[in-house]
Image: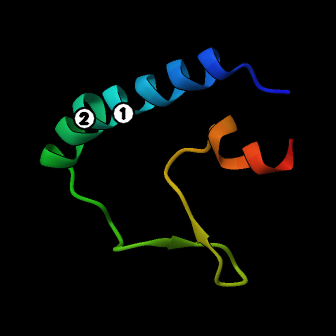
Amino acid sequence: MFDKEEMKKIKQLKKEWEDNVVKKTLERFPERKEKFVTGSGKEVERLYTPEDIKELD
């Protein structure tokens, strides 16, 4: 279902975003919490991409 080249591109763009935008932002404004969770205690990631559901394909 997911194109392998598109998945590589998305993964790379996410890494660039984390290394640049997120890193700079967190230097100025640290995280409010160590981790974020749902009301039922399930941990929530900062960003979800198709990579997170590839096993559903």
Label 1: state its secondary structure.
helix
- The residue where tag 2 is placed is 19
- In the picture as drawn, the residue positioned furthest to the left comes out as 27
Distance of label 1 from label 2 (alpha carbons): 6 Å
- The residue where tag 1 is placed is 15
38 left or right of 27 in image:
right
34 left or right of 40 in image:
left
Does residue 22 sit above or below 32 in this rendering?
A: above
Label 2: state its secondary structure.
helix
The quadrant holding residue 14 is top left
Q: Residues within 10 Å of mark 2 (few under 14, many from 20)?
A: few
Residue at 32% of width from left, 66% of height from top?
32
- In the picture as drawn, the residue positioned furthest to the bottom comes out as 41
Disc sitting over residue 48 in the figure: none
Task: Indicate the position of residue 48 as horizontal and vertical percent values.
Answer: 61, 44
Q: Quadrant of the C terminus?
A: top right
Q: Residues within 10 Å of mark 1 (few under 14, many from 20)?
A: few
Do the residues bearing badges 1 and 2 touch, measured as CB atoms within 8 Å? yes
As rendered, which of 31 and 54 lies closer to the eye?
A: 54
Q: How many marks?
A: 2
As rendered, which of 34 and 16 lies closer to the eye?
A: 16
- In the picture as drawn, the residue positioned furthest to the front comes out as 4
Residue at 21% of width from left, 41% of height from top?
23
Q: Quadrant of the N terminus?
A: top right
Amino acid bearing label 1: Lys
Task: Indicate the position of residue 44 as horizontal and vertical percent values.
Answer: 58, 64
Residue at 73% of width from left, 83% of height from top?
40
The quadrant holding residue 42 is bottom right
Amino acid bearing label 2: Asp
Residue at 74% of width from left, 43% of height from top?
54
